[in-house]
Amino acid sequence: MSKKKIAFICVHNSCRSQIAESLGKHLAGDKFEFYSAGIETKPQINQDAVRLMKKLYEIDMEQSQYSKTIDKIPVPDIVISMGCDVGCPFMGKALDDNWELPDPTGKSDKHFIQVIEEITRKIKAL
């Protein structure tokens, strides 16, 4: 039986959705296939997110992930929004969930860690 594909969707696919993809693979990669995407891309993943994921989980997101648009991933079975304030991209199906996470970009490590911990909790609950 093939694993269900879960896509984490954000506008830029550079921070929260990337964290969720890497934590999904790390925590539940045996149960699901995880992807992340956006409607726009950034030249690199948010460097604070990269640094904190290395520190907290010893995960180097830049080894296997990059910022990509929704047409570059397989059609997902489950679509989860990270909390797009400006409207999420449409993936051909309704959102299964909106985690409504605040964007920690430009904020302190404390804000980033709170978002990372919340994503961890939600992935464990899938």
Image: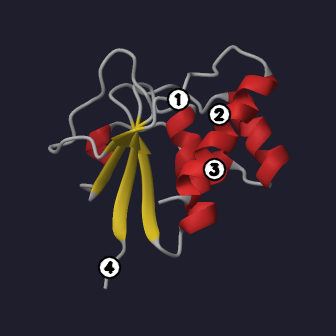
In the picture, the quarter occupied by the N terminus is: bottom left
* Residue 113 in the image, given as x and y percentages of width and height: 75, 34
Number of the label disc, if any, that sits on residue 101: 1
Labels 1 and 4: the sequence-earlier one: 4
Q: Residue at x 45, y 58 (%)?
A: 34
| Mark nearer the viewer, 4 or 3 | 3
Name which residue type carries label 4.
Answer: Ser
Question: Residue shown at 43%/52% (left/top)?
Answer: 35
Q: Dot 4: few (<14), some (14–19), or many (≥20) neighbours within 10 Å?
A: few
According to the picture, the residue beneath numbered tag 3 turns out to be 120
Determine crowd level at label 1: few under 14, some 14-19, many 20+ residues with C-alpha closer than 10 A. some
Q: Are marks 2 and 1 in contact (CB under 8 Å)?
A: yes
User: Which three-letter amino acid code belongs to the residue tagged 3?
Assistant: Thr
Q: CA distance from mark 2 to mark 4?
A: 30 Å
Q: Which mark is residue 16?
A: none
> Does 50 sit left or right of 17 as displayed?
right
Q: Is residue 4 above or below residue 48?
A: below
Which residue has dot 4 on it? 2
Whole-angstrom CA distance, mark 3 to mark 1, is 12 Å
